[in-house]
Image (cartoon, helix red, strand yellow):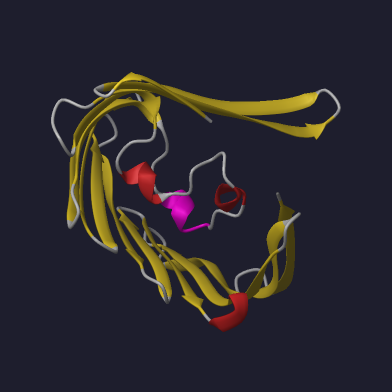
Amino acid sequence: MMTWKPTKWFAFKTWGIAQVESVGNVSGMAQAWIVFYPLKDFSIEAGYRSTLPTEQRPLPPTANSQFETWSECQIVGAAPNIKLKYSGQIYDAGLGLAYRNGGLEYSAMVGIKFLKISGWYNQPTKQGGLALTLDTKDVYNTLVLKQDVLANIIIIHLPHGWELYSDNGVDMKINKLVRCETGILKTFESKLIRGLCGVGYNHVDKSINVYFFPHF
C-alpha cells in the first residue's frame, strides 16, 4: 500500500496484491485513486477502488481479507467510482456514483460511531442491496440484504482472544439455507507472527472445518 500526499488538499493512493497458486499460476489485484480535501472533514475520491458499501468488507491487502466471511462477500466489490464523504467525530456520511455492469450504480452511506449502514442500486441490472455493520468491543455483526440473498455474520469477542462466530445465508429465490457455519476461533500474537486457529461446523455441507491461519 502506498500514499503520496504532496499537499494538504490532495493525495494519491494505491495498493496491490499478488497471489501465487502454483508455479506459473499467479493472479493479482490492484486499485488506484486520487483524493481531494476541499473542506475540513470532507473528501472527494475518484478512481478504481472500493465503493461506499465495499468499505464494509475487509481491505484486500490485509490479513482480515484473507479470512473474509461468506456474508461479507455478498456486498458489492470495487469498481470505477467517485464518492463524496464527510468524516466527523460523531458520524460519517457519503454519496457515491460507480460504473458497473455497463452502467451507473448509485450508493449512499451513513455511520454513527460503531454503527454503519450503506445501500446501492445498479441501474443496468435493476438490482440493489443494503449492508448494516455493528462493530463494538464485544460484538461484530454485518447484515446484508439483497433481492435474492439474506446474509449475516456475527462474531462475539470473548476474553483472552477467543471468539464465537456464526456465518449464515438464505437464498430467498428458492427459500433455502445456503450457508450455515458456527464455531470458535482463537487469535494469537507474538513478536514474530500473528494469526488465528479454530474449528467450525457447516450445517449445509455437514462438515467440520478446521482453521489455522498464521500471518506476519
Q: Is residue 183 left or right of residue 11?
A: right
Is residue 123 something one can see in this rendering? Answer: no
Q: Is 114 within the magenta?
A: no
Residue 9 image offset from top left, x and y in percent: 24, 22
- Residue lying furthest bottom: 159
**Vertical arrangement, residue 21 with respect to residue 197, above or below:** above
Residue at left offset 48%, top offset 50%: 73
State left or right for residue 154 relative to residue 136.
right
167 or 216: which is nearer to us?
Answer: 216
Q: Is residue 182 left or right of residue 95?
A: right
Q: Residue 188, image x and y in percent?
A: 68, 67
Against 101, residue 69 (above or below) is: below
Residue found 45% across the figure and 65% down from its top: 169
Q: Position of residue 106 (x, y in %)?
A: 21, 35
Residue placed most toward the observer, 39 or 174: 39
Asked whether the viewer can see residue 93, the reply is yes
Is residue 106 left or right of 178 when viewed as pictured? Answer: left
Q: Position of residue 84 (x, y in %)?
A: 19, 32
Q: Quadrant of residue 145?
A: bottom left
Magenta part of the chain: 70-74
Vertical placement of residue 73 versus 79, above or below: below
Q: Residue at x 19, y 41 (%)?
A: 94
Find residue 195 and report its image quarter. Answer: bottom right
- Name which quarter of the figure residue 205 lies in: bottom right
